[in-house]
Image (cartoon, rainbow, N blue to C red):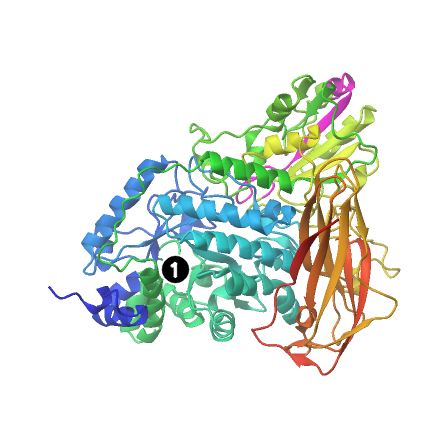
Amino acid sequence: MTTAPWRDHALPAAARVDDLLSRMTLEEKTAQLYGVWVGASTDGDGVAPHQHDMSVDHDWDELITRGLGQLTRSFGTAPVDPALGAQALARAQRRITEAGRFGIPAIAHEECLAGFTAWQATAYPVPLAWGATWDPPVVEEMARRIGDDLRSAGVHQGLAPVLDVVRDPRWGRVEETIGEDPYLVGTVGSAYVKGLESAGVVATLKHFAGYASSAGARNLAPVRAGVREFADVTLPPFEMALREGGARSVMAAYTERDGVPASADPELLTKLLREEWGFTGTVVADYFGIGFLQTLHRVAGTPAEAAHAALTAGIDVELPTLKCYGDPLPAAVRSGQVPEELVDRAARRVLLQKCELGLLDEDWAPEPAAAVNLDSTGNRILARRLAEESVVLLDNPDGLLPLAPDTRIAVVGPRAADALAMLGCYSFPSHVLTHHPDVPAGIEIPTVLDALRTELPDAKVTFAQGCEVTGPDTSGFAEAVARTSEADVCVAVLGDRAGLFGRGTSGEGCDAADLGLPGAQGELLDALIATGVPVVLVLLTGRPYALGRWHGRQGAVVQAFFPGEEGGPAVAGVLSGRVNPSGRLPVSVPQVPGGQPWTYLQPPLGLAGEVSNLDPTPLYAFGHGRSYTTFAWEDGTGGEEPAEIGTDGSYDVSVTVRNTGEREGAEVVQLYLHDPVASVTRPDMRLIGYQRVAAAPGEAARVTFRFHADLSSFTDRAGRRVVEPGALELRLAASSADVRHTARLTLTGPVRVLGTDRRLRCETEVSGVE
């Protein structure tokens, strides 16, 4: 028996795929370009936008005779035992391979934003919490574990990470982002990509590009970002995750910029992504995104026209199902409306990826691992570490924290005794189980109330809910005030309920009109403070909320961004002092609910000034966070005269960080760039490097940042990325508002125009100091 060339391991992947394509019919090629979503709900409460009116009926048995590109969310659609789900997925793959002429399995994809979105899988902290750790290595380890779990269940592709940079914190999907700075998003996001890809799972970058810049922070609203904002804020995290992380897939965004939807933009998906950046993987549609070209954007009159526009732009795979790339596409090819070359181009990319994954090999087998355990002890240990590192102590002016072990504590608030308070909208319990109220969560999720009782067994802990997360009802205030009046300290646990499309206060389609605490929670906090009992405010949220109204009236403020299944013990550990808080803000915390949007990346006119009565200065700055120990910053680089380097030169800037307190802790040393004069307006400060440093009492470390002039580059008036000669300041800081040392530089020489080989990262070195 002679093996066909496309089955021959000895041949290059490109040759194998070319041979396979030459043997396929038009229907078999287009079948590789779409997914099928078995079991998806068609009612009004789906997990994707317009799921109820965009789903397509199909005959499964007939459909798979052509082959199939992708299987959509076999685990993330309904609660299924992981082991049984893995067996069912294997059976589906067997049916697909047996039904088609070539026996090619589908790529199975799943959501994995804060862990594998499957029943009984570990619910890790959300990406905004990853940003709060400022610790890429631990994020990489988390992603590797997520990838291992996906692989064990038969899944090949993960739809994560989200690399959107926060531009307006009212947007509901802020919880899914890593923060408001492109360097932080790029470095942490790249770490996630490395971890997922190291497990053999295809990482999918979301959402390419500009989704977070939607007007008015309304989900899917038009993007108003200009050319330079798009190039210098939106795009860098994607470029870094491709170049350094090695991501093999990109998801096109729902939104449009300047009248062109991302899903129909060849300048973005082909010219920039492939021709300039050299990307060779697959581009997939966000769910129903191709159909939206017809129904929402109205740049196509029919599904076939939408398919033509998307294929021309460079979208290879329609997800989650076959609205446009199914029957409409081959019919449009046969009528001459769509060139078959576009189908071939996309099918070739899909099959190359399947070849990389081993799905074209004769010995490929779909059977899962012997055991499928998606919430292992190792997972939970890592989830706890991430949660503990992500908790941010915003304020503790009088040392109220840590709490005394035998004190009387009134725990109050609608987030204190609810396990879902720990989880973001893409965790399985929040994302899917709301449609299955009789099914248990499947994982243990201690609440803050339970964890605090465990953490402080000698304390007298009472509880009152006070109010709901949303709604005006204040009938529970009296009990909350009574419990607080009887206590030595009140722990007020307030915040968000994650959900989808208006079913929560945070999450996809849950955008906020302003940044006031939801419902009556602000009034509840007023009532608790009025008792005169010291109040510790604990926030479990998916976005920052305005806290200026209570500034100086609280004993302490603790911020946790949906910290996952181990978030309760992590928060309780910070309150008890078992955990020394080391999280730093990945987003600014505003003073007032209005006067937004605002992030710290502002040119001079975006800062406070005498020309407006509104002061946008945040209450707590990007990068801010306190500790139970103290650090001295010593011997920072920088003298009286500026150092001179060329526009292609480099310069080392260093500082010694010494733990001057009485307990071990971690400091985050941040490096910012200030460009006094440029040919276009520049942010007053922007992050270009950072290093998390752990130190025991009395211990010191020397942190050195290896700055290269490329890191000062920006997009000029002609659309080129350039390094300009002139003065610069490198600012070593504990936050964007707390500069400790400044090194001045002068760049000399000509303007340099940079290409895609420019340096994206500021390398760091940490050495011990006696």
Q: Kindly indicate the quadrant of the structure image that contains residue 715.
A: bottom right
Toward the bottom, the furthest residue is 750
Toward the front, the furthest residue is 770
497 is within the stretch colored magenta: yes
Residue tagged by mark 1?
318
x%, y% of residue 56? 34, 52
x%, y% of residue 393? 72, 39
Q: Is residue 583 above or below residue 278?
A: above
| Depth order, front residue of 330/440 | 440
- For the question of whether residue 386 can be seen, the reply is yes
| Depth order, front residue of 367/283 | 367
Q: In this view, does 321 lie above or below 760?
A: above
Q: Kindly indicate the quadrant of the structure image that contains residue 679.
A: bottom right
| Depth order, front residue of 100/721 | 721
* Residue for point 36% across, 54% down: 321
Q: Is residue 192 above or below residue 491?
A: below
The region drawn magenta spans 481-506
Callout 1 secondary element: loop
Q: What residue type is labelled 1?
A: Glu
User: In the figure, is residue 300 to the left or right of 330?
Assistant: right
Q: Assign the N terminus to one quadrant of the image.
A: bottom left
150 is within the stretch colored magenta: no
* Residue for point 18% across, 60% down: 101
